[in-house]
Image (cartoon, rainbow, N blue to C red):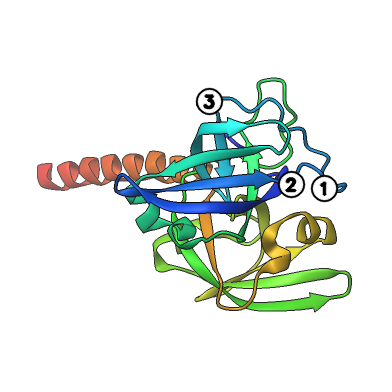
Amino acid sequence: MFTGIVETTGTVVDATADEGGRRLRIEPDVDDAATEIDFSDLHHGQSIAVSGVCLTVEAFQTDPTPWFEVFLAAETVAKTYLGDVAAGDRVNLERALPAEGRFDGHLVQGHVDTTTEVTGIERVGDDWVFEFELPESIERYVVQKGSITIDGISLTVAERGAERFGIAIIPTTYDVTTLSAKSVGDPVHIEVDVVAKYVEQMVSGYVEGLDDRLAAGTSAE
């Protein structure tokens, strides 16, 4: 489980096809003064969100230059844009939330629901407003002021239209994530709020049961 509070960014230093999937080697930006994140506790089997995709550390080095390797299964390659990243590309990184950790974002599973594109970027005062295409498959989960995860970042929907939605980005988020490197047309990962999915499932079950009872009552008459 993650929170959507990106710890730091990282750089892909190697990307190779492997066993029907893909293997990435990533170097975290541990010397970034804006984050000051210590990756010395990396270990085999650790969960880590790479631009919002939950992956497993399969190999690592902590000294002198930290790096870790993750494997992308064929499904991950097909459903995310990580299958297209190359050496030099930057990604957002967040390790799994520890039991004693502070919960600052919202519940993030690292299970990408879909990808979409950046359709607009505008500077508004000190902030930035990003606009994204709204895929039909997730439109019922995207609500104004609701939580959404974009490339592993916990964000709030500022505006929601029929085909697009907008996010207001504060300077800190812009500076410490890969959003600062995004351009119109670039892909992003989206994970909708899992709470909305649970509510939908519970309510739909109740509605179906109610429909069945109403139908049975009508038949009895």
| Residue 162 in picture, x, y percent from top left | 51, 75
Q: Residue at x 23, y 40 (%)?
A: 213
> Residue 169 versus residue 70: which sits nearer the camera?
70
> Residue 214 versus residue 176: which sits nearer the camera?
176
Q: CA distance from mark 1 to mark 3?
A: 24 Å
Q: Which residue is mark 2?
A: 29
Is residue 18 left or right of 52 when viewed as pictured?
left
Tag 2 secondary structure: loop
Q: Residue at x 74, y 38 (%)?
A: 104
| Residue 219 in picture, x, y percent from top left | 11, 46
Is residue 203 left or right of 161 when viewed as pictured?
left
Tag 3 secondary structure: loop
Q: Amino acid under label 3?
A: His
Q: Quadrant of residue 208?
A: top left
Q: Quadrant of residue 180?
A: bottom right
* Residue 160 seen from this side: no
| Residue 72 in picture, x, y percent from top left | 41, 46
> Residue 142 versus residue 83: which sits nearer the camera?
83
Q: Tell me whether the residue at label 1 lies in contact with that at label 2, contact meaning CB atoms closer than 8 angstroms.
A: yes
